[in-house]
Amino acid sequence: MENNQIIYYKQLDSTNTKLQKLAEDGAGHGTVVVAQKQTAGKGRRGRNWESDAEGNIYMSLLLRPDIETAKASMLTLVTAYSVAKVIQKYGFENVQIKWPNDLVLSGKKICGILTEMKLKGTEIDFVVVGIGVNVNAEAFSEELSDKATSLYLECGEKINPEHFIQDILHGFWEAYEHFIEKTDLSFMQEEYNAMLVNCNKEVKVLEPGNEYTAVALGINENGELLVENDKGETKTVFAGEVSVRGVYGYV
Ligand code: BTN
């Protein structure tokens, strides 16, 4: 899937919203929307995604995979893994993943991923995967400055966003092919776990109506997080339903 149709915009409300509209109008698998800025960037859990800084990555990918709906959440982990590999390639060996899909550098967020799915009956009509990477941001709002960082702030050098996007797409499609072959994450499980920020650390599992602390062990081949609770039992935490926090803060 190397010949994606990439549609560039100077400014959009949200690349995810735009691509969902294009998908409704019949855009094909592999269509990519990129914006230099977003006026209403969307984050997970109804939050907004700060998108004023130019030179950052705001992009969305349209997928029309022939897989069970229950497996779609794995696409988010495939994306996190692929973007983390690109960040590593740019020399940031210490990039980490906060399960399921935040990327972290020096304990601060560097990339967020928002996956939105539309069903047709019980089947997947399309999935839009939105990727925001803080590449060249020189500063963040006061609210975010202690939680977010950019590659520029980490190394003092600007990165060409076009090249970065091409690298993401290249890495993503390679990982996507592997994923589709077996529709599981066995091909990346080990590398993902090696980057997992919470691995062997205490985390707070926030299940609706059930909050507990446990030690994160790593993901299984379905992308679920295995944790050991204080009774020594291994529990499976499903992406999408719960969130996991470090006991002392964001990571
Ligand atoms: C998160 O909350 O961590 C997810 C943030 C996802 C942000 C990206 S930026 C490109 C795409 N368009 C959006 O409106 N959101 C995603």
Image (tube, grey):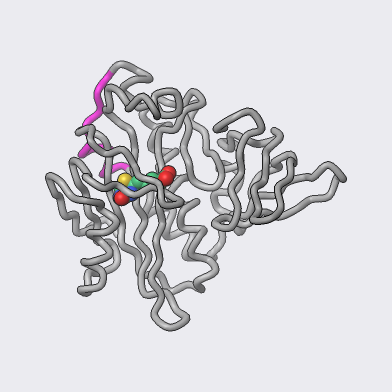
Residue at x 40% of width, y 38% of height: 111
Residue 6 in sight in this render:
yes
Residue at x 27% of width, y 19% of height: 157
Picture quarter with the N terminus = bottom left
Q: Position of residue 143 (x, y in %)?
A: 39, 28
Picture quarter with the C terminus = top right
Q: Nearer the viewer, residue 194 or 23?
A: 23
Residue at x 87% of width, y 45% of height: 231
Q: Identify the residue at the far left of this view.
A: 10
Q: Identify the residue at the far right of this view.
A: 231
Residue at x 20% of width, y 39% of height: 162
Q: Position of residue 44 (x, y in %)?
A: 43, 50
Location of residue 147 with respect to 240 vertically, above or below: above
Q: Nearer the viewer, residue 6 or 233?
A: 233
Left or right placement of residue 86 versus residue 197 in this view: left
Boundaries of the magenta span? 157-167
Location of residue 124 with respect to 46 vertically, above or below: below
Q: Position of residue 183 (x, y in %)?
A: 53, 65
Q: Main secondary structure of the magenta part?
A: helix
Location of residue 196 with respect to 235 vertically, above or below: above
Residue 131 in sight in this render:
no
Q: Nearer the viewer, residue 30 or 213?
A: 213
